[in-house]
Amino acid sequence: MAKKSILVEVNPAVLIWLRESSGWEINDVAKRLQTSERIILAIEQGKKQPTLRQLKTLAVAYHRPLAIFLLSEPKEEKPLPKDYRMITGKRDRFDKKTLLAIRKARHLQTVSQELAKNTDRDTSLQVEFTTLRANPQEVASSYRELFQLTLEKQQNFTSSYKFFYYLRDVLEELNILVFQFSMPIDDARGFTLADELPVAIVVNTKDIIQARLFSLMHEFAHILLGETVIDLPNLSNFSDHKIETWCNEFASAFLLPSSFANNLFDLNLVNLLDTEVLKSLSRKTNLSKGMLLYNMYKMGFITLESYKGVLNRHQKLAETKEKEKKTKEKSGGGIPQDRKCLSELGVKFVSLVADNFESKKITYSDALSYLSIKAKHFDKVLAKAEK
């Protein structure tokens, strides 16, 4: 005898809100539930009740708790970040994974507020806001000083990852949360949440690390401007968007001051576009070849045609290498969970959780939930966060 389906009474407005805020279309839902679009429309119009099994399937698909489907009304959420991606035909339309990353960051931001309050931690932003009237190169120079980032220190980092984590640590000291989540690379490379404290930056783990370095400082520029935005930071995208241009110039000047770049390029003037020379300069600065090429063009060392041609070749090589690296990581069992947790959430957030757990403000179960880890990884994560 076939099992009888359990029907669940839900508010159709809640179903529509959950679907749309998760980036799903009617046809997507119909395929996932193995039914017709007509049935889904009937459910969302209140003419038909969904089954418990259907709601469980949607909870998994939307990455939402089952209980949220039983709300009496749609939950009020913060608006999405301003869309500065400049993608034709996709204004304010985001991939499901990008929307999930935004929701996750918002949740962690709220959790951070509560955890900081529990332990009397200050969450106020420890930098001064600026405006588009300020010179981005001068602002960048002042922040290199604040970050104590000398040219010698930058060249002494043994990898771009070390450079990235140094900058992340400094930003966290300024009360800026820095998260790393996976999103489709052509949909978003980063976003900022500056309308709540603590403010947060999210960069895309699908990007190569050198591109993440640029996105990190580009998004920091948006924080300095007090903006909550989502974008595709890219120096090769010549745009007349004043804010994106300002943030690009800030990030470029911060990561590669013109005086430093000029000396580097002068020393290698004869073979500037040689593959080995570019590799050497990239290792020396811990920056991408794209960043170096952009500055060569901007400073008049190469033509626009040379810039675009060489950039295209090196971008393809970099993307191929990154894919090969991630394939090796997957075949080898992936990144260890303790490392992955710290990479995604950062030391500041993990420390907030640890302090609350140790002072008995939250339970062990709460701590594991906030960190999205299993019990066997908990001690390792906390130990690494203390280093």
Image: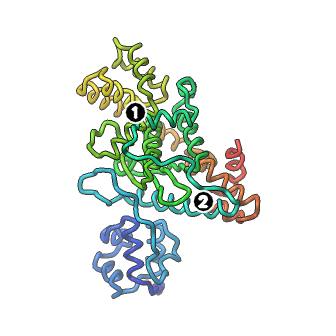
Residue at horizontal 33 percent and vertical 75 percent from the top: 35
Q: Which mark identifies residue 112? A: 2
Q: Secondary structure at mark 2?
A: helix
Compared with 324, 128 (above or below) is below
Left or right position of 250 against 144: left
In front of the other: 15 or 301: 301
In front of the other: 138 or 53: 138
Exactly how many numbered labels are in the figure?
2
Compared with 151, 359 (above or below) is below
Compared with 168, 100 (above or below) is below
Give the Cα distance between marks 2 and 1.
Answer: 35 Å
In front of the other: 353 or 300: 300
Q: Position of residue 43 (x, y in %)?
A: 35, 82
Q: What crowding class fits label 1: few (fewer than 14 Cα within 10 Å), some (14-19), or many (20 or more)?
A: some
Q: Position of residue 241 (x, y in %)?
A: 29, 46
Residue named by callout 1 = 318
In front of the other: 340 or 2: 340
